Image: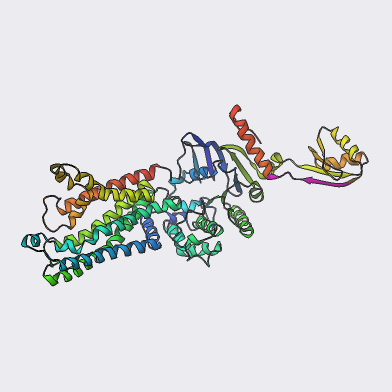
Amino acid sequence: MTATRPVTPAAPAGRAQRVSQARVVRSEWTKLRSLPSTAWSLLVTVVSIVGFGVLYCLLRVARPPADPAALAAFDPTAVSLTGVQLAAIAIGVLGVLLVAGEYATGLIRTSFTAVPRRLPVLWGKAIVFALTTLAVCLPVTVIAFLVGQSILSEKRLDIALGHPGVARAVLGSALYLAAVGLLGLGLGALLRSTAGAVAALLGLLFGPQLLVGMLPATWSDQLYRYLPVPAGAAVANVRPDPLILSPWTGFGLFCCYTGLVLALAGWRLVRDDA
Amino acid sequence: MIEAHGLTKRYGDKLAVDDLSFTVRPGVVTGFLGPNGAGKSTTMRMILGLDTPTRGSVTVNGRPYREHTAPLHEVGALLDARSVHPGRSAYHHLLALAQTSGIPRSRVDEVVEGVGLAGVARKRAGGFSLGMGQRLGIAAALLGDPRTVILDEPVNGLDTEGIRWIRSLLKGLAAEGRTVFVSSHLMSEMAMTAEHLIVIGQGRLIADAGTEELIAQAAPGVVRVRSTEPEALAALLRARDVTVSPDGDGALAVSGLSTDQVGRAAGAAGITLLELSAQQASLEDAFVDMTRDAVEFRAPTRKGAQP
């Protein structure tokens, strides 16, 4: 035993107890899976995606497009993925809760005494939550799509997964949900209050469209494509639309918005008292 | 070892902690005493890097807390029993904490067993009583087998058995050579647990001394003496420039002399004593006096009063 050894002989060496990002990711995974609210929120997400998709498909089968113009504008992919916008709210709110919930309960102080550099906690949460959301939502969007198309096929309104842009729209919907989740998580960390962050999330998702809608059409048509939801949802667009950005450009812009919120959250996390 | 130098924290225009300097040494239980709102919790949060000092600095085991790469092995902290998510089980709370530092599951089971939560570890922490919450917080503090233990009001909500358990736990940790820093607003509790006391009031240091020394200063003993000739004895003792007052039953309360001195004086004068005992003044009263005085003296003289 050397003189530099800690005074606690029973202790494992301090070296073995170093905090690392990988360890914090494991810890955040334990936190995420051990809260009942996670399972409930994800269940709401799954039911929203599949349930509303099925419901809307049944509705369109009952009232199919009346004329060739309406048929040309009919987007079977979008119809089967209607539930994604609703699911986005559930995922976004869950993201808020993951951080704001720790502030509300005081757990954040325990988390930061374990990880005094703090940022690994935020990144750990973001990594775990984004991967979990993808792991849940990707199969569910595929299922919603397949079930929806089988319903639509009754009136020959369906489209194949192999059709150009369709697979990207289905995959992109899951990616969009993960990104909205991260936006919620970032807002939760930035504002530290559940109510405030949920209000900010809903405001960011739905507010800009309302505001831009009040502008003259020439302006609003130009601005609309850069707003968070129209930009992010572009990734699920199959039919070319001159009013919105191309799929990956739009989604990239949404990721930039999310990244900006996360960066601000990280800045406040390190700077302010916990 | 915890070392604070000129630690100051200002919230808006309120000074929560004002130029606090002290050292907490390993091997003994150090009590951190002050009335509610004195700045104890703020000081502890600054020690743990949760709040940034407005001025001054504080190190734990030689470094600012945020610079430790294995923080759970350096410091175990109990901040308050509610620093837990109510929806999560005690076991998963501790497991998540352990995983940040690569502490094995076996250690989680060990501390759960050690604090007596084995039967309820898989239950939601939200359903825990205050006492069980405190035990969970202490389990979290001990997880990394830390060299320094910082506990904010650990006996809050504990029953008598729990309080005894905490006392022996703290003394045991100190005996193993660890630094043990425990806050409380109850002087009588600290008198039984801590060997050294750091007392603050309104964010300022009032006293930093051994517990016995501090009690002797802050709550000087009174000698109760009953004799066959109380008037003669009173006159005899008053001549020695001490305070003597009737204490009922023909007894006298003498402050300023020890029992030995009173006994010898009576013996020399041939007065028969029926009763002679040292009475400890109420620790809580002494503590209230001590902190109130500090506040009173503070404004005009700027320098904090001595106890």
In the rendered view, how is the structure colored? Answer: rainbow
Residue B280 is inside the magenta segment: yes
Residue in view at x 89 percent, y 40 percent: B230
Q: Residue furthest left?
A: A68
Q: Residue furthest top?
A: B300
Residue B160 is inside the magenta segment: no
**Relative height, residue B108 to residue A252 (above, below):** below
**Relative height, residue A189 to residue A166 (above, below):** above
**Relative height, residue A73 to residue B27 (above, below):** below
In the rendering, at what x and y percent does residue A27 appear? Answer: 39, 58
Residue in view at x 25 percent, y 63 percent: A49
Count the labels in the image: 0
User: Is residue B6 in view?
Assistant: no
In the rendering, at what x and y percent does residue B176 appear? Answer: 59, 54
User: Is residue B279 in view?
Assistant: yes
Write down the quadrant of residue B286 in the picture: top right
- Give the magenta range: B274-283
Left or right placement of residue A30 versus residue B301 in this view: left
In the rendering, at what x and y percent does residue A206 appear? Answer: 25, 50
Write down the quadrant of residue A268 in the picture: top left
In the rendering, at what x and y percent does residue B274 appear? Answer: 88, 47
Secondary structure character of the magenta stretch overall: strand
